[in-house]
């Protein structure tokens, strides 16, 4: 694909997003930025959340990982459904009952000032790292498709990418993002479907033959019960981890919950969560099927698989399919891939930027005590600050990354979200008090102790941790809260 064509597509795409931002931000104040005045239809929230939840990590990393892990990731997706049920029936009613803007305000009511600030700080660190890693995926693809051929260095392309996000989110906030995420989810799903259709066409498969070929290959193996708990693909490890990852990365995350809190009432929010769960399972199955088709296609055509599996989809879409004749549909797939990866990653990153701005403004800048003019000024400064922080984290991650990005994302989450899991479980399911002044220190200690235990067990005990270190992290957090409650 020509880099000038790719650049033109990107500019048109962002022009549409900026136009949407302009229309949705008319008359917007800081309440619109944070909650959209609780006026968003549930179906827009549900569909838009698909793009936010998946991001570029799922778009590239899940299909790429099929070659090494088959469909084992679907075991985690099934676990997600249990987690989302918990969110809809336990967490969301709590948030609506307390009429929260920042969900971490709950801890001030339940535990105290320092518990509240600690929970929000954990989210800010977790979401900054996680979203920057997700954005790194899109930055890499855009670098290959556009900026490398034009001689633009990676650091500058990242800066341009983040600046484009800032342009269409700085004013409208969550009100704009609910609409843009709906558009971006549409592009994401369309890109996957078109790629599957093109590969099937190139391999001369009808729908039935495609399904049977994928299902009969070992790439489509879903359930792994052998190997015990030491196997990272073990069903119980994946399923349980999936349930808790969904709870912490969605239900205890200001980003995803901020969208749910834009619904008119708890009934619509729960309806949103139900349909979101159903569609998310189907879309993840599409991504896994795409991965199997890509590996079968590469094998049939003698295409060498990249050393990093994350590079497989971009390589096929931009270099192989993109060089096909227009009539074959290759260029169309290359174009939709470029828009799809951009949409997938930006749907996650733009809402994260807004959620981080919300959490910092509400939880640390005491917005409820400020005048509207002062609120707007501080909101804009905070928005710019987190944009620059994203830039720094992406540049650092680019030098340090040595694994597939989906694994890196969940590993980061297992350490950073663990204290949040412990705090919420302790607060909701026990009536024990806490020693509020000790909570920040326990939040720091729990991930450190988790890392040390994981290191010792894996190097001297022979057990291989998956993402269940999230549970260990949360348990250590709860033990710390209980031990220090009377100090």
Image (tube, rainbow, N blue to C red):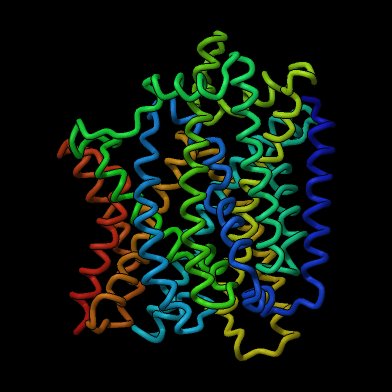
Q: Left or right: 370 with respect to 107?
A: right
Q: Which residue is drawn at the image coordinates 70% and 29% (left, top)?
A: 333
> Where residue 343 sits: x, y (%)?
67, 46
Quarter of image, res 364? bottom right
Q: In the rendered view, tell whether residue 291 sits above or below residue 483.
A: above
Q: Quadrant of the N terminus?
A: top right
Towards the viewer: 118 or 41:
41
Count all numbered tags in the image, as a single digit.
0
Q: Which residue is drawn at the image coordinates 62% and 46% (left, top)?
A: 344
Q: Quadrant of the C terminus?
A: bottom left
Towards the viewer: 370 or 34:
34
Q: Left or right: 120 with respect to 236?
A: right
Towards the viewer: 312 or 42:
42
Quarter of image, res 263? bottom right
Towards the viewer: 17 or 377:
17
Q: In the rendered view, tell whether residue 182 sits above or below residue 149.
A: below
> Where residue 260 sits: x, y (%)?
54, 68
Q: Left or right: 93 with respect to 207?
A: left
Q: Which residue is drawn at the image coordinates 59% and 66% (left, top)?
A: 42
> Where residue 407 sits: x, y (%)?
42, 40
Q: Residue furthest left?
A: 461
> Where residue 477 sits: x, y (%)?
27, 66
Q: Which residue is drawn at the image coordinates 67% and 49% (left, top)?
A: 184
Q: In the rendered view, tell whether residue 241 sits above or below residue 426.
A: above
Q: Residue furthest front?
A: 208
């Amino acid at each position: 694909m020509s880099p000038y064509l790719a650049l033109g597509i990107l500019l048109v795409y962002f022009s549409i997003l900026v136009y949407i931002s302009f229309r949705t931000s008319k008359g917007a104040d800081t309440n619109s930025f944070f909650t959209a005045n609780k006026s968003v239809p549930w179906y827009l929230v549900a569909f838009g959340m698909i793009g936010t939840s998946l991001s570029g990590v799922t778009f590239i990393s899940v299909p790429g990982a099929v070659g090494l892990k088959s469909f084992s990731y679907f075991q985690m997706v099934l676990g997600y459904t249990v987690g989302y049920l918990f969110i809809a029936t336990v967490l969301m009613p709590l948030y609506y009952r307390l009429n929260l803007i920042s969900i971490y305000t709950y801890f001030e009511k339940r535990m105290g000032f320092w518990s509240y600030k600690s929970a929000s700080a954990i989210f800010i660190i977790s979401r900054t790292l996680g979203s920057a890693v997700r954005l790194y995926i899109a930055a890499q693809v855009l670098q290959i498709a556009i900026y490398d051929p034009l001689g633009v260095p990676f650091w500058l392309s990242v800066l341009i990418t983040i600046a484009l996000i800032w342009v269409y989110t700085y004013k409208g906030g969550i009100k704009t993002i609910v609409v843009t995420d709906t558009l971006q989810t549409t592009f994401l799903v369309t890109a996957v479907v078109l790629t599957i259709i093109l590969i099937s066409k190139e391999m001369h498969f009808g729908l039935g033959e495609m399904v049977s070929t994928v299902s009969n290959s070992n790439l489509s193996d879903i359930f792994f019960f052998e190997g015990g708990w030491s196997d990272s693909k073990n069903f119980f490890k994946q399923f349980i981890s999936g349930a808790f990852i969904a709870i912490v990365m969605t239900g205890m995350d200001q980003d995803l919950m901020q969208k749910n809190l834009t619904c008119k009432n708890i009934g619509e929010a729960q309806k949103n969560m139900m349909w979101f769960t159903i569609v998310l399972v189907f879309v993840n199955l599409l991504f896994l099927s795409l991965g199997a088709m890509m590996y079968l296609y590469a094998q049939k055509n003698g295409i060498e698989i990249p050393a990093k599996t994350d590079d497989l989809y971009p390589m096929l879409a931009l270099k192989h399919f993109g060089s096909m004749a227009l009539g074959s549909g290759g260029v169309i797939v290359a174009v939709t891939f470029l828009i799809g990866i951009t949409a997938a990653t930006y749907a996650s990153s733009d809402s994260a930027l807004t959620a981080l701005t919300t959490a910092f403004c509400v939880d640390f800048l005491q917005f409820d005590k400020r005048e509207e003019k002062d609120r707007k000024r501080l909101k804009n400064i905070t928005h710019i600050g987190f944009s620059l922080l994203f830039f720094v984290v992406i540049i650092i991650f680019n030098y340090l990354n040595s694994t597939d990005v989906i694994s890196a994302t969940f590993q980061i989450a297992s350490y950073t979200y663990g204290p949040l899991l412990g705090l919420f479980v302790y607060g909701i399911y026990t009536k024990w008090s806490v020693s509020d002044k000790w909570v920040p220190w326990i939040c720091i200690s729990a991930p450190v102790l988790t890392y040390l235990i994981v290191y010792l067990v894996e190097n001297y005990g022979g057990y291989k941790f998956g993402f269940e270190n999230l549970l260990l992290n949360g348990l250590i957090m709860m033990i710390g809260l209980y031990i220090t409650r009377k100090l």
